[in-house]
Image: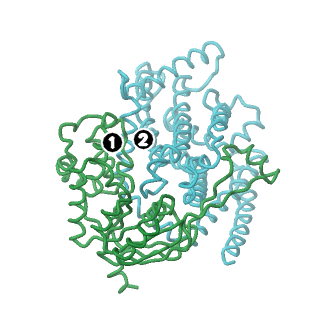
Amino acid sequence: MEENQNNIAVTVEGVSMRFNMPKEKLDSIKEFFVKLLKKQLRFEEFTALENISFTVKRGEVVGIVGLNGSGKSTLLKIISGILRPTEGHAVTYGTLSPLIELGAGFDFDLTTRENIYLNGSVLGFDRAFIREKYDEILDFAELRAFENVAIKNFSSGMIARLGFAIATLVKPDILIVDEILAVGDFLFQQKCEARIAEMMAGGTTVLIVSHAMEQIERLCSRVIWLEKGHLRGDGPTAVICEEYKNAR
Amino acid sequence: MKKKLFYALAVVLSLLSALAFGVLIPNRAALTNPASWDIHIFHGVLGLIVPLGIFAFLIETLFDREAFKKDVGSIRRYRYLLLDLVSRDVKTKYRRSVLGLLWSILNPLLMMLVLTAVFSNIIRVQVEGGFALFYLTGYLMFTFISEATSVSMMSIAYAAPLIKKVYLPKYIFPLEKCIFSLVNMLFSLIAFVIVFVVFAAMGKITPSFAMLLFPLPMIYVFLFAFGISLILSAAYIFFRDLAHIYSVILTVWMYASPIIYPVDILPAWLASVMRFNPLYHYITYFRDVMIYGRVPSLYENLICILFSVLFLALGILCFRKAQDKFVLYI
């Protein structure tokens, strides 16, 4: 086990995720009991992921592809610990930065400055550490002129920039990127990619979900292909991407 | 299987303790206080529920040590988040109001003036030390509990955008709301100090060293409120009706607690029922310390602690059972 931890970053073992979709949303106890008595309390089971297993080695850059609703985001959420799988388990070794949705935890009534501290602590950073990196964040997000403005006045691009700047503050062992590079103008996208590339060079393991095949082909060394919650393919980028494109 | 054995043992031990507390100990207490049968029942019930709650908590923790370690470990990591959330709440609560934080002091003062006018002139409730301070102490305690629990109840649901996107220990949210309410209460305590100083200057009351004990009842009541908050915030995710029911419960609870009336005006049977209301013990403790300069006995401390520990244990128990399902329901 100890040996494993030295070169394995993520283990996903037999992970299944099933959601109970109530046919109608029950929001009250009365309704609940009425339905219970009438035996109408049926759930439609929806399987988002079915028995997924794979391991990711340290330093690998893995792209996850699949059509909408194939379970990509669910998988990333399970790996980052937001969701607990119905069966199986996912283990990560080392620190983890999830870039699942930028600016999660922003309070739109607070200013940029306050939000930097707030979001930093949401991600579990030390207060002193954020103070030290404060200028770096402002510069990267190009928001120095808006330091004391409530972020409800910001454009979505500005918020994404701020979120990215805070989330990538430390070099994590594992970086999880979900579709976030689609926001912002191309200049900022280049900047983000440069930062991710910098982390990859430093040995960070990266998991990327993207619909931009061109991006996947450029960044990843390995691709995992999900289809309707099943693992359809797992292998070198060139091979899987070709199959995926042809399948469409 | 092993778990069932532990539970069986816990039930047996709890029954024994119920017997011990219900039968033996009141006899000694009866020497000083020639109370009737009701104290036996009270001690018996307390002797049964408290060990049951604590045992259940210990057994579940024993069988899920990972979750326990995770929760304890995350307190340190997320302490800044806790502080930030509290300071955000304080900032946004009074944002755009001219008097701002001063309202935390003014509100209880104004409430006190209104109720004192009504209850000492129109309805004429007689209490030791004057109605104003009597009411203020009860009001502070009750407002803390009602604010902490009702705000906490919604806290998980309101944090939905956050919980869906980042991993955070979920108990942070009710805990934060309880701390926020505690901060509010500390501000409101200034109102008490103002009135107290005025009364002392008028010679109606004398300050005592017992007042230095004021953090104790606040710690007890905080733990109690936190336990309730954990239960409510978890339950609210699954039953949204709770918000409506709870506001009614709070009103009932307010009138069932000695806030605007002293216990001695109650008929004997109601006074014995009152013992089961934890708030009664906290308020009495708080008044003893703050107004009457009495140092509460070990027994009174024990009752308060038992209620706090019981609800805290139950709260953690329920919350931990439910927390993995939150994401799916919010």
Chain B colour is: cyan
Label 1: which residue?
A156
Coordinates of residue A16 in the picture (x, y in percent): 56, 70
Coordinates of residue A96 in the picture (x, y in percent): 35, 65
Coordinates of residue B215 in the picture (x, y in percent): 44, 44
- Provide the secondary structure element on which disc 1 rests: helix
Label 2: which residue?
B212
Residues flagged by tags 1 and 2 on a common chain = no
Amino acid identity at mark 2: Leu
Coordinates of residue A241 in the picture (x, y in percent): 38, 71
Image height of B238 relative to A241, above or below: above
Q: In the displayed structure, does residue B110 sit left or right of residue A186?
A: right
Chain A colour is: green
Q: Is there any visible trace of residue B71 in the rendered image?
A: no
In the image, which is nearer the foreground, mark 1 or mark 2? 1
Query: Separation of disc 1 and disc 2 at Cα?
Result: 52 Å
